[in-house]
Image: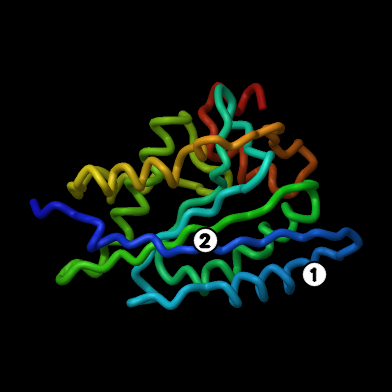
């Protein structure tokens, strides 16, 4: 099995960031603004349909995942520019609901000759790494993609990059770990990824 290196998975810098520094926006206004900011910052990719992306919170707020907390809220693959257009619905809702929160999107090209589906395997392995660390799925992920996980081999540098994307940022000063309440429209997505015993107590 060929080893996948940083030549095949290239994380783009800088990260895409969205933060609202003022209040009074409606949800529809916020969605439009979030889409505009995502579009303005989106990097030029070698093959737009072959990428992975990790959506994280930035700043003092993280997500409560039961026994631990993490800034990660979604891991995805495919045409990130198009998919983030749809994700702006819940990104904007979160930004206007939680003070001092900022959303960061890290995007990586996943391009290897003869392996056009590489991004699906990378997404699955990132989700699996998150699950092994936190015992649940990121807030807006619905399944573990087991069909694709554990099928590829990565060198140490790639694994190190994966760990950075799914874990806490070294030196971050998290002050809050949040979760949606039962009457929040985003609660079903949050609770769907928790283990059965967590769902009973959530």
Name the residue: 80% across, 50% down.
97
Q: Pointer 2: what residue?
A: 15
Q: Pointer 1: what residue?
A: 28
Residue 102, x across and y down, in percent: 68, 53
Element assignment for label 1: helix
Report the quarter where the C terminus lies.
Answer: top right
In the drawing, does residue 201 fall left or right of residue 119? right
Is 87 placed above or below 100 here?
A: below
* Sequence-first tag of 1 and 2: 2
Residue 158, x across and y down, in percent: 28, 49
* Residue 176, picture quadrant: top right
Is 21 placed above or below 80 here?
A: above
Say which of 123 and 170 sits in front: 170
The residue positioned farthest toward the front in the image shown:
171
Say which of 117 and 133 sits in front: 133
Query: Can you tell which of label 1 and label 2 is closer to the viewer?
Result: 2
């Amino acid at each position: 099995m060929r080893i996948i290196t940083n030549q095949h998975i290239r994380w783009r810098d800088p990260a895409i960031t969205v933060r609202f520094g003022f209040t009074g926006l409606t949800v529809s206004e916020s969605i439009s603004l979030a889409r505009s900011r995502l579009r303005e910052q989106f990097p030029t990719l070698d093959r737009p349909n072959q990428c992975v992306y990790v959506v994280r919170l930035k700043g003092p707020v993280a997500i409560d995942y039961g026994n631990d907390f993490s800034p990660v809220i979604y891991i995805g693959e495919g045409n990130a520019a198009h998919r983030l257009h749809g994700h702006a619905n819940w990104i904007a809702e979160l930004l206007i609901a939680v003070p001092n929160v900022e959303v960061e999107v890290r995007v990586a090209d996943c391009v290897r000759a003869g392996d056009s589906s590489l991004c699906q395997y990378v997404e699955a392995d990132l989700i699996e790494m998150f699950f092994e660390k936190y015992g649940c799925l990121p807030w807006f992920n619905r399944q573990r993609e087991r069909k694709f996980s554990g099928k590829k081999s990565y060198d140490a540098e790639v694994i190190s990059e994966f760990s950075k994307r799914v874990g806490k940022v070294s030196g971050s000063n998290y002050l809050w770990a949040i979760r949606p309440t039962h009457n929040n429209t985003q609660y079903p997505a949050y609770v769907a990824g928790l283990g059965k015993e967590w769902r009973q107590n959530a």
